[in-house]
Each structure stands twice: as structure tokens, then as C-alpha cells.
Image: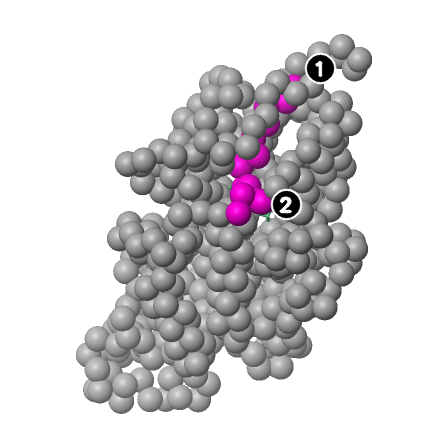
């Protein structure tokens, strides 16, 4: 079933042990339109009881619309169970990844424990969809015990200076820190900013969206991308820039990212726009890339390598995977020469940006330049593009500014989002801690605006560098 064609029902009666099967007729009398879910049936029960299926699967016609909920952790049985259920005419098949009962999630290793195995859930959904013509869906919870986002949030906060953390610890545990940050914040980014998680040089009269695209096209032009080339996007987020650059330049872009959730989301969005045949994602750390030497015709990074615990180590890896004679271009987050490390206010702003954006430490642009040269690159040109942006890059975050097109980022928009998140958390629809995540993202926004206004910070220190044709050339 194609997702765009399927509108989920407004009102459903969720599956509940000992209630939804026994009281379905009553529920139907109360509402003609509610979608009724069966209690979970293990795929094995359907498969092993195939001569006795009416007992488990039959229902009276007035119960439509009705959804069959299947549970299990064996793909073959899940496929077979779906096929056996088809003749009964359910309106949807739902796969259970939400049952917390110890019998199911503990012993049986399915139900909510499947939330820890998204790859299997993807495969299970594919086999269900391949064996039925009705819509398919997944039931999940908003967290798994001891692995919920609230625990992750508390651990994340402990990494940072303003909450007692140390820079060395952030650097030593950068993978854990950055992943926790993006697990917590990706949905907020996508909601507030869009699919590309970066700032942009902006002309007067240009919308934020247009400027973001042009910022990406600029990178493609600087790299001189040609149709058919193999390009690497280092720290690709959910792939907004990857899709734009791949379509703009007719190249095959590989997105490298260490965050599982972002990759899953990126793959889905690639499928929607149809670049999934030419572009892919690889889950790995950009400090240890799983690619052979000299693999790519071009490499770019947008506001991502600032997460590296050590710039030289990261640039050296990029140098290794780039073909000789080819180019690497990036937009780096940097402190400018106006930043005074002894100034208390400057220190506070830097710390706010670090906690709010999952960074171990923000480097000076001159340190990045030195690291590039040390890694072996020859520098073609470099410049802080923020210094020549007619509209400041931080304007969309500035609460003094109001815009309808970026309403969610304005003071009023953020006030509405804050209260909506508060409400959703209160009624249990958003995970515990959502409000605190929103708070530290707002703090980050304030730090970014102040850093931009004082010109001590830039998110667009641009450089174009080249790997020499042979070492020493
Ligand atoms: C600010 S986002 C930018 C994303 C993307 N370039 C864009 O502009 O939409 C930074 C990205 O770097 C990724 N990242 C951070 N540390 C990484 C690492 N060590 N290895 C791979 N990716 C990493 C994060 O997961 C995130 O996707």
C-alpha cells in the first residue's frame, strides 16, 4: 500500500487484552466509524491452527472497519499468517511492536522488544505488505523501559559544561553524545526547519527555503560536480542536501551518518522523491569510514564535521577516501577571530551553542584550516561566508523578527510549539522530557543568535580544498 494514498482513521479502538475482542459489537454500536482492532494474534497461532482458523479470525460483517493485529518474530510465519488471514477480509493488518507484557516482550522476544530492532520491523512490514492488498501499519509505544528518551536526555545533559560535564569526556564519548543529541532533536529540527539541517547565506527577497537550496547548489558548483560522479556527503542528517545535490547535479550521493534514526528517515524520504536507486546511506563514524582509499570523485560536509572530536582525524579520513586530484568542500561551524576565550560572556555563548547542538568543542576557523593542510589538502579558497550575507544567517532564529513563512521559528511560533509540546507530554502523547529538549534547543537558538550578532561564531566557514594528484605534488 502506498503511504500517500492511505489516510489513517481519526478514531480507533486500540487493541486491549480481554476487551477489544469481547466487546467489539458493543463498540460498533457506539460508533459506526471507529476502526476496531483485534487483540494480538501470534503469527504462530494462525500458522499452527490453520485447520481451525474461524475460531481465531472470523468476525461478523457489521464489525467493519476492522484491523487484524499480528505479533511475532519469525518472518516466514508472519508472511504465512498474513496470507492465511487474507480470505477473512480485514481492512488493515497491524504489526504489534508495542505489547509490554513480559510473556510477549520478555520471553517471546516480540511485542515492544521489537522497537529495539527496527531493521527486523522493516523486514516484517515488507513481508506483510507483500502478502496482502490492504493497508499495513505498526503499533508501537513512545519508549522502551530503561531505553526511553527521558533517560537518554538525562545522560545527554550530563555531558555538558553548564550541567557539570567536561570537554574531555565529551570528546572521548562523542559517538554516544552526538547520537543521543540527534535521537532527541531530529523531529524538532524537521518540524521547525525542514529536511536540510543547516543555515544559509541569504540574499534580500529570498525565502529561507530558497536560500538553503542555493547554499547547497553553491557547494555543488564549487566542487564542479558532473553527471554520474560518485559523491560522499559526510554527516548527512536525514539527507535534505543529498537529495537536492543529487538531483541538481545528476550525481550518485552516498550519505554517511552515525545516527540510525536519521538514516531510516532519510531512506524513506529518498524513496518518496525517487532517488533511492542512485543514492544510498551508510551508517558509520566519519572518524573511521568503511570505504576503500580513493573511492569518491568529490566529498562535501555541511555543518557536520564540527561534531568530530578532532578535526585533523576527520579530514585525514576524508582525504583517504577521496580520489587524487579531486575536491572536498564544506561549511564548518567555527569560532571567529573575534572570539575571546577569556571573556566570560563569550564563554557562556559558546557553551550554550555546544549543549544545544551536541558539540564537544567549537574550533576556531584558523584551527580547521591548519588541520586541512596537515591532513595533506591544498587549499583552493576559504572564507567566512557569514561576513557577506545580506540577510543574517541567524535572522530566522531571532525572536525580534516575525515572518509568516518561518512562523514556527518566531517568538509566537516557539511559544505555541512550547505549549503544544508541554500539553502533549502532559497527556502522554509525547515522551517524558520533550519539554526539556525543546528548552535546550531554544537555549541553543539564543546562543546562536548572540554568537552571530557579536560575530564571534559562524556556521558557514567555507573552504574548497583539493587532494593533490600524488603525495608531495
Ligand atoms: C547539523 S547535522 C547536519 C546534517 C546535514 N549535513 C544537513 O545539512 O542536513 C550534523 C550531522 O552529522 C552527523 N554526525 C555527527 N557526528 C558524526 C559522526 N561521528 N559520524 C557520522 N556522522 C556524524 C549527525 O548524525 C548529523 O546527521
Residue 439: percent from left, percent from top: 50, 67
Residue at 44% across, 23% down: 249
Number of residues whose C-alpha sits closer than 10 Å to that of mark 2, classed few (under 14), some (14–19) or many (20 or more): some
Please, what secondary structure does the residue beneath circle 2 have?
A: loop
Mark 1 or 2, which is nearer the eye? 2
Q: Is residue 179 visible?
A: no
Q: Is residue 200 left or right of residue 447?
A: left
461 vs 171, nearest the viewer:
461
* Magenta segment boundaries in residue numbering: 454-466
Residue 461: percent from left, percent from top: 57, 34
Residue bearing mark 2? 339
* Of callouts 1 and 2, the N-terminal one: 2
Residue 341: percent from left, percent from top: 70, 49
Q: Is residue 276 left or right of residue 369?
A: left
Above or below: residue 97 compared with residue 131: below
Viewport quadrant of the C terminus: top right
Residue at 30% across, 54% down: 402
Whether the magenta-drawn stretch holds residue 462 is answered as: yes
Residue bearing mark 1? 468
Amino acid at each position: 500500500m502506498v503511504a500517500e494514498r492511505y489516510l489513517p482513521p481519526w478514531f480507533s479502538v486500540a487493541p486491549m487484552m480481554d476487551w477489544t475482542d469481547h466487546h467489539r459489537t458493543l463498540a460498533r454500536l457506539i460508533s459506526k466509524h471507529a476502526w476496531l482492532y483485534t487483540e494480538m494474534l501470534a503469527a504462530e497461532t494462525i500458522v499452527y491452527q490453520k485447520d481451525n482458523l474461524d475460531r481465531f479470525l472470523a468476525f461478523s460483517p457489521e464489525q467493519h472497519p476492522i484491523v487484524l493485529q499480528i505479533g511475532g518474530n519469525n518472518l516466514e510465519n508472519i508472511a504465512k499468517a498474513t496470507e492465511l488471514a487474507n480470505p477473512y477480509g480485514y481492512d488493515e493488518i497491524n504489526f504489534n511492536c508495542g505489547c509490554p507484557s513480559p510473556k510477549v516482550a520478555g520471553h517471546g522476544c516480540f511485542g515492544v522488544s521489537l522497537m529495539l530492532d527496527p531493521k527486523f520491523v522493516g523486514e516484517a512490514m515488507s513481508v506483510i505488505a507483500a502478502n496482502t492488498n490492504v493497508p499495513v501499519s505498526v503499533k508501537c509505544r513512545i519508549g522502551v523501559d530503561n531505553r526511553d528518551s527521558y533517560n537518554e536526555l538525562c545522560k545527554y545533559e550530563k555531558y555538558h559544561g553548564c550541567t557539570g560535564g567536561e570537554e574531555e569526556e565529551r570528546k572521548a564519548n562523542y559517538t554516544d553524545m552526538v547520537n543521543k543529541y540527534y535521537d532527541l532533536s531530529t523531529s524538532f529540527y524537521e518540524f521547525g526547519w525542514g529536511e536540510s539541517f543547516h543555515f544559509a547565506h541569504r540574499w534580500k527577497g529570498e525565502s529561507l527555503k530558497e536560500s538553503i537550496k542555493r547554499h547547497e547548489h553553491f557547494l555543488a558548483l564549487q566542487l564542479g560536480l558532473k553527471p554520474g560522479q560518485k559523491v560522499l556527503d559526510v554527516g548527512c542528517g536525514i539527507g535534505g542536501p543529498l537529495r537536492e545535490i543529487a538531483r541538481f547535479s545528476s550525481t550518485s550521493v552516498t550519505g554517511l551518518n552515525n545516527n540510525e534514526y536519521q538514516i531510516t528517515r532519510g531512506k524513506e524520504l529518498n524513496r518518496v522523491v525517487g532517488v533511492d536507486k542512485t543514492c544510498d546511506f551508510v551508517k558509520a563514524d566519519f572518524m573511521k569510514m568503511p570505504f576503500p582509499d580513493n573511492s569518491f570523485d568529490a566529498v562535501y560536509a555541511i555543518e557536520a564535521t564540527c561534531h568530530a572530536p578532532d578535526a585533523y582525524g576527520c579530514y585525514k579520513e576524508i582525504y583517504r577516501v577521496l580520489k587524487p586530484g579531486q575536491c572536498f568542500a564544506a561549511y564548518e561551524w567555527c569560532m571567529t577571530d573575534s572570539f575571546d576565550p577569556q571573556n566570560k560572556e563569550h564563554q557562556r555563548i559558546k557553551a550554550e551553542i555546544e549543549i544545544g547542538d551536541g558539540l564537544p568543542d567549537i574550533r576556531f576557523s584558523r584551527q580547521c584550516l591548519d588541520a586541512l593542510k596537515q591532513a595533506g589538502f591544498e587549499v583552493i579558497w576559504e572564507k567566512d561566508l557569514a561576513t557577506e550575507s545580506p540577510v543574517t544567517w541567524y535572522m530566522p532564529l531571532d525572536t525580534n523578527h516575525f515572518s509568516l513563512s518561518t512562523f514556527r521559528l518566531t517568538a509566537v511560533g516557539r511559544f505555541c510549539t512550547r505549549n503544544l509540546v508541554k500539553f502533549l507530554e502532559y497527556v502522554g502523547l509525547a515522551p517524558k522530557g520533550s519539554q526539556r529538549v525543546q528548552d535546550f534547543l531554544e537555549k541553543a537558538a539564543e546562543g546562536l543568535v548572540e554568537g552571530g550578532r557579536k560575530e564571534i561564531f559562524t556556521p558557514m566557514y567555507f573552504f574548497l580544498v583539493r587532494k593533490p594528484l600524488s603525495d608531495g605534488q
